[in-house]
Image (cartoon, helix red, strand yellow):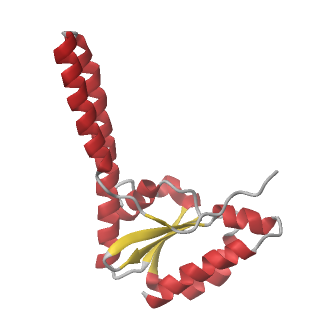
Amino acid sequence: MPLPQVLPPQELNDDLGCFVFLAIFAAFAVIVVALTGVMWLIVPVVTIALALAVYIGKQKIGIQLGLRELEERELAGLLVYSDSPLWRTRIESEWLPRLGDRVAILNWSDRRSWDADDPLVRLYRGCATRPPVLIALRKERRPLVFAFAPAFRNAKHGSGEELEGLEKKMFGMIDTA
């Protein structure tokens, strides 16, 4: 079985491109209905467009609220990890002492007790990445999302260079923040 691909940190996508797509979709649907005269099509199309707009809007607002929360608390990022034996020891013994109180922390294993309205929970859910993950703030730029799960799996199978490289980038960003 091939090892999972380790991706470099990705910018957190919080733009409004989806809303533009929905507006074009709705306009196209209205034009089709007007040209064909099939009025019953407008109801499902508008319903789908509105449902998607509400869902995407809630995610985008959640991301923005979480980022604002981190900025107000003057934190460098959000770390989300779990009690998995694959990474728990390393994160708790090496990362947490080094990160200290510069990042907010959520434990995925405790997600049943998370408050769904907590801005940091909404930020993590908006990023849609499995733990462990670090969302690192950058001044005047979009945050970076460090997804560590594939790197930890590769390290388990003897390929730890990618994990070490990703950690080096993460600590470099956090240490300079």
Image position, residue 12 (x, y; %)? 42, 63
Q: In which quarter of the image is residue 21?
A: top left
Q: How many marks?
A: 0
Q: In this view, does 155 lie to the left or right of 34?
A: right
Residue visible at 67% across and 59% down in the picture: 5
Check the image and report above or below for 133 versus 49. Answer: below
Q: Residue furthest bottom?
A: 176
Q: Residue furthest front?
A: 35
Q: Quadrant of residue 141?
A: bottom left
Residue 42 in view, yes or no? yes
Quadrant of image for the C terminus: bottom left
Residue visible at 48% across and 56% down in the picture: 113
Image position, residue 105 (x, y; %)? 49, 72
Check the image and report above or below for 49 versus 10. Answer: above
Residue visible at 39% across and 64% down in the picture: 120
Q: Which of 12 and 29 is in front in this view?
A: 29
Image position, residue 144 (x, y; %)? 46, 70
Residue visible at 28% across and 40% down in the picture: 53
Residue 86 in view, yes or no? no
Check the image and report above or below for 43 versus 27. Answer: above
Image position, residue 55 (x, y; %)? 33, 42
Check the image and report above or below for 125 versus 48. Answer: below
Q: In this view, does 127 lie to the left or right of 171?
A: left
Q: Residue furthest left?
A: 34
